[in-house]
Amino acid sequence: MVRVEYSHRVLCNSNFLDWLSQQPDREQLLSRLMHIKSSSKYHRGEHNIILESEEKICMEMPKINQKYLGGAFKSEEDPEFLSIHTDHISKNIIFAIYLTHFKPYACVLLTSPEKEKNYKLNQHYNKIKRVVVLSSEEAKKSINDYFRAFVNAREIERL
Amino acid sequence: MTTTHIIEFELQEDLAELIENNEEVTFDDYNIKKQILATKVGTLLEVEKEIGSFTKIISIKEVDEELLKSAFV
């Protein structure tokens, strides 16, 4: 059974998916995210998350078929504790911090290159280390690194 | 009875474990079971299921980049 202890949970926003849909290697990245979501040791099927409020934004102008989006990211209803935040950036950062309360106690927050700076300047992102905001090539690198861990585990399992 | 269609993405071994441990999971065609068991461990599958009272596996497809060409609108 291929199970991987990934170093970070994955949370994404609608901007990341918009960016992803424009990448020349988008099918490969989506496939890799789907493999990661399905093989997590502690959060099988729930490793990669998108808040429902972010998914709704995606569905207003869909660029990814909802079936495959669900294969890559589990849609999670916005918890009540996020209702005090009016902006999407704070909601996503607070939720990413919340995800670090559970194994593996760290989370990457994937966004678009255009939004990365706004996330990093958000007051809630100040001085935290367990949440890492990534975009563009760094986001691709993290996905590829996690997928490599999956492939290694799969090769061992197939021996 | 109204049946419910669902699509899920599962690794081969998780699907194999399900069918080995739950006799209420059936198949539209017995060849699908053989196909699942013959697929390599660690292969991600798109699984179409129908839930009435029993669960019926209707089809499986291997998730690869070719399949995901239809993922982007």
Image (cartoon, rainbow, N blue to C red):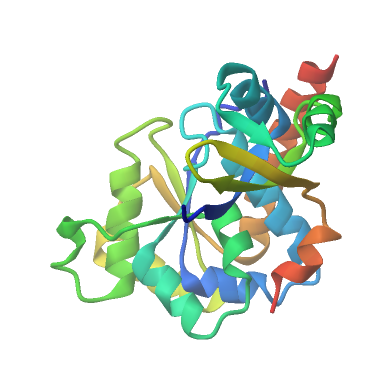
Q: Image quarter for residue B10?
A: top right
Q: Residue at x 63, y 70 (%)?
A: A65
**Residue A112, image x, y percentages:** 55, 72
**Residue A53, image x, y percentages:** 35, 70
Pick the front one: A97 or A44: A44
What is the quadrant of the C terminus of chain A in the image? top right
Above or below, B27 relative to A52? above
Above or below, A159 relative to B39? above
| Residue furthest bottom in the image | A61
Q: Residue at x 28, y 64 (%)?
A: A91
Marker count (numbered): 0
What is the quadrant of the N terminus of chain A in the image? top right
Q: Image quarter for residue A69?
A: bottom right
Left or right: where does residue A149 sit relative to residue B69? left
**Residue B21, image x, y percentages:** 57, 17
Left or right: where does residue B29 sit relative to residue A44? right
Q: Image quarter for residue A70?
A: bottom right
Pick the front one: B65 or A11: B65
| Residue furthest top in the image | A159
Pick the front one: B36 or A139: B36
Q: Residue at x 63, y 28 (%)?
A: B14
Q: Residue at x 77, y 62 (%)?
A: B68
Q: Is residue A126 visible?
A: no
Q: Is residue A97 visible?
A: yes
| Residue furthest front in the image | B1
**Residue B27, image x, y percentages:** 70, 36
Above or below, B66 relative to A58? above
Pick the front one: B70 or A87: B70
